[in-house]
Image (cartoon, helix red, strand yellow):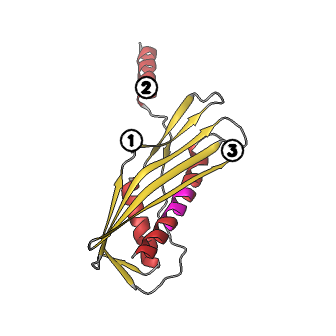
Amino acid sequence: MKSIFVAIFALLIAGCSSNTPVLGLSPYISAAAPAPKTKSAGELNIKDSRQNTLIIGTINDNSGNLIDEVLLKTDLSSWFENALKTELGARGVAIGAGGATISVDIKTLNAAIEGYSKQNMSAKAEVFITIVNGTRTITKRVAQDQSEFAALRNARTMEPFVESMLRDIIKKSADQIVSSL
């Protein structure tokens, strides 16, 4: 009787535990040299319009069949807002000081590892930036595709790859915003 109880308990624990890989994002640190505040923006609004905001990537076998989905532990909108504020601040843009309203819409961010070919890990990101300053509206698109070889097909391999791409997207977004203010 005792062994039946232990077996049922083990099955219950195994069934309730989750093996879904989760990816976290490290806080953003700007590499830009600090600049004096010469430009300003009133608001910075970030919207995550991806179809599924929880899934950041997939891991597939050689035939393209889904092995696992990689979830994002970090709220992407909050991370993107903090990262962009950090980068803009380092480039001399004061957020909350009046002026233009900046809206960023995250349309695409996904990564995939498939098989063991040369460029088996790929990622794509696309954001749209709208800057409204009085009656003038400027819309910019920032996008990036990247790929590389990954010997291991897991979320740990994907994490620095996705973070690198996001850091590039933040820098490119800041470039577009600064040149438009």
What residue does disc 1 label? Answer: 51
- Name which residue lies at 48% across and 64% down: 170
The location of residue 9, given as percent across then percent down, is 41, 23
Quadrant of the image occupied by residue 178 = bottom left
Q: In the rendered structure, which disc, 3 or 1, sits on the residue that comes first in sequence? A: 1
Q: Residue furthest front?
A: 135
The image shows residue 172, relative to residue 75, as above or below, that is below
What residue does disc 3 label? Answer: 119
In 3D space, how far apart are the residues under numbered discs 3 and 1 (Cα atoms)? 25 Å
What label sits on residue 15 in the rendered view?
Answer: 2
Q: What's the residue type where badge 1 is placed? A: Gln
Q: In the rendered structure, which disc, 2 or 3, sits on the residue that comes first in sequence? A: 2
The local secondary structure at tag 2 comes to helix
What label sits on residue 127 in the rendered view?
Answer: none
In 3D space, how far apart are the residues under numbered discs 2 and 3 (Cα atoms)? 35 Å
In 3D space, how far apart are the residues under numbered discs 2 and 1 (Cα atoms)? 28 Å
| In the image: residue 28, left or right of residue 161 | left
Which residue is more in the foreground, 127 or 17? Answer: 127
Q: Which residues are magenta?
A: 165-171
Q: In the rendered structure, which disc, 2 or 1, sits on the residue that comes first in sequence? A: 2
The location of residue 119, given as percent across then percent down, is 69, 44
- Name which residue lies at 44% across and 32% down: 17
The location of residue 1, given as percent across then percent down, is 41, 12
The secondary structure making up most of the magenta span is: helix
- Whether residue 28 appears in magenta in the rendering, the answer is no
